[in-house]
Amino acid sequence: MNIPGYLEALIRELSRLPGIGPKSASRLAFHILKMNIDDVRRLSGAIIDTKTHVTTCPVCGGIAEGGNCAICVDAARERGVLCVVENAKDVLTIEKTGEYRGLYHVLTGVISPLDGIGPEDLNIKPLVQRCAGGAVKEIIIATNPTIEGDATGLYLAKLLKPLGVRVMRIAHGLPVGSDLEFADSVTIAKSITGRVEL
């Protein structure tokens, strides 16, 4: 069967998304084809609006809609505690637990020499600057429980402890090798509560 060029292009673009293989892309494309034009316009508009208006928070590296993110400007947050995560989506995962009331810092990855990612490739320098001011008393390392996540945590501990900051690691209630994104809220909450010092 010859697939129309436009449909083939849509399937190809959808299959470029993470976790979407050719079969899933094909199912999505045919679903979009069945949608009414107003629903398609809303979907495409939401994608364009998100890409146009959602930016990176200049303070923590999380997501924001222009300027600082809602967490960084929230005066009710505990300003002396920073939770350090790999990616902005990890902030949303931890926020869903409702257990953590401090601030965040997004590294944008982990140290991974095999992938050519060193400390200079991550958002570490601004973290050190935030801690050097003296307002931050505790860091909670919440990188994924992988070899790279643990190595990054140890690297940060060596860097930040001389600044008089207490460096903690979330408890490994999370299975080794898993991602925060896929953990349930109770497990993440217990990991934050049972954090250990590095």
Image (cartoon, rainbow, N blue to C red):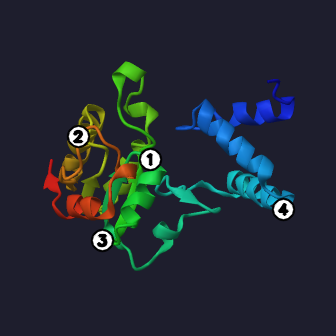
* Mark identifier at residue 99: 3
Q: Residue at x 38, y 74 (%)?
A: 77
* Mark identifier at residue 152: none
The kind of residue on which mark 1 rests is: Asn
User: Residue beneath label 1, please?
Assistant: 87
Observer-side mark, 1 or 4, equals 4
The secondary element bearing badge 4 is classed as helix
The kind of residue on which mark 4 rests is: Asp
Disc 4 to disc 3, C-alpha distance = 39 Å
Marks 2 & 4, CB-CB < 8 Å contact: no
Q: Residue at x 30, y 71 (%)?
A: 99
Residue 104 position, x and y percent, is: 39, 59
Disc 1 to disc 2, C-alpha distance = 18 Å
Disc 1 to disc 4, C-alpha distance = 33 Å
Q: Nearer the viewer, residue 99 or 73?
A: 99
The residue carrying pointer 3 sits among few (fewer than 14), some (14 to 19) or many (20 or more) residues within 10 Å by Cα, namely some
Observer-side mark, 1 or 2, equals 2
Q: Earlier in the sequence, mark 1 or mark 3?
A: 1
Q: Residue at x 23, y 51 (%)?
A: 163
User: Residue beneath label 2, please?
Assistant: 176
Q: Earlier in the sequence, mark 1 or mark 2?
A: 1
Residue 81 position, x and y percent, is: 29, 64
The secondary element bearing badge 3 is classed as loop
Q: Nearer the viewer, residue 37 or 175?
A: 37
Q: Earlier in the sequence, mark 2 or mark 4?
A: 4
Can you tell which quarter of the image residue 76 is in? bottom left
Residue 106 position, x and y percent, is: 43, 50
User: Residue beneath label 4, please?
Assistant: 38
Marks 3 & 2, CB-CB < 8 Å contact: no
Q: Earlier in the sequence, mark 3 or mark 2?
A: 3
The residue carrying pointer 1 sits among few (fewer than 14), some (14 to 19) or many (20 or more) residues within 10 Å by Cα, namely many
Observer-side mark, 4 or 3, equals 4
